[in-house]
Amino acid sequence: MGLGKHRMNDINTWFPSLDTYRETHSCSTLLDWQARRANIKYRTTDGQITLAHTLNNTAAATPVSWPRSSRTTSRKTTPSTSHPACAPTCTIATSSDLTAGHHRHPPAKVSAVSNTELDTLSFRGDKAGLRARRAADIPILHNELHHDPVDSSRASGRAWIPISPDNPDDSPFAVKPDAPHAVFSIVDLATGDLAGDVGLWGIDLHNRNSQIGLVLRPTFRGRGLGTDTIRLISDYAFTTRGLHRLEIRTLADNRAMIKTALAAGFTQEGTLRHNAWVNGTYLDEIVFGRITPR
């Protein structure tokens, strides 16, 4: 959950064209956190003035709803429960419906990714694809991966600072053309959705080496996208950029990234003791390396 949220309820929508549920709506209880910032008060029946409690709602996540509803499929769908943002190709399900297994499955599966989306991929693996960063990707990545100081500090290795999403050029996910980096957006081939960020950082053309940085959106973790992504960007680094050595550094307690690096063909080379200052304590970093395949 984001800052200030006391409770958050997500609503998932069934998309027949994707054969899956996707999160499209949310309702967050903020208590008086937002009211304190906006100075929203009310007078009680006994005359006392106090802060109001507020809700923060997403009526419909249009980047999710509209592209999915506009895809052409080979079968007609008549939803039993309509919603104006995604009719006539989706039905609404609450998280309790999903937990209870009340899924309304279509009679046949269709392609999860449109040909148009596939055509934009520069590299494609078994589960993940890589494409150039789009302007529309920046606020999504920024809001999900930068807003939390704890998670952002663990992922970036830098001191967290607040950056407004209203200034996308200042976001750490904005592309800096003159920087010695090569940045891609990760696409989940199963859904066609933006799944995360990956890049070659600090490309050294003299020594022909670079570090790989990878971060996935929370809902796309645990699907095997990380290993596929590391393989794809490694191939780009060795084949297209002519690099000789790649390096991955991760916190010693990041078991998921350690498993991903090893599965992608990297060798564990050592430990940098107390090399990372993260949220008030020093943590060890594990170094993985891979040399140009011969």
Image: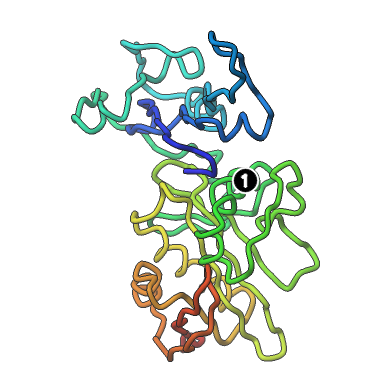
Few, some or many C-alpha atoms within 10 Å of disc 1 (few <14, some 14-19, many ≥20)? Answer: some
Amino acid on which the number 1 mark rests in the picture: Asp
Colour theme: rainbow
Residue drawn at (41%, 24%) of the image: 73
Q: Is residue 261 left or right of residue 194?
A: left
Residue 56 % position (x, y) = 54, 27
Eyeballing the image, is 22 above or below 280? above
What is the count of numbered marks? 1
Q: Is residue 174 left or right of residue 48?
A: right
Eyeballing the image, is 188 above or below 34? below
Residue 228 % position (x, y) = 41, 63
Q: Nearer the viewer, residue 161 or 36?
A: 36
Q: Nearer the viewer, residue 131 or 73?
A: 131
Circle 1 sits on which residue?
137
Q: Nearer the viewer, residue 152 or 62?
A: 152
Q: Residue furthest right?
A: 178
Q: Mark 1 falls on what kind of element?
A: helix
Residue drawn at (59%, 12%) of the image: 47
Q: Is residue 56 left or right of residue 96?
A: right
Q: Is residue 115 left or right of residue 169?
A: left
Residue drawn at (55%, 69%) of the image: 213
Q: Nearer the viewer, residue 131 or 195?
A: 195
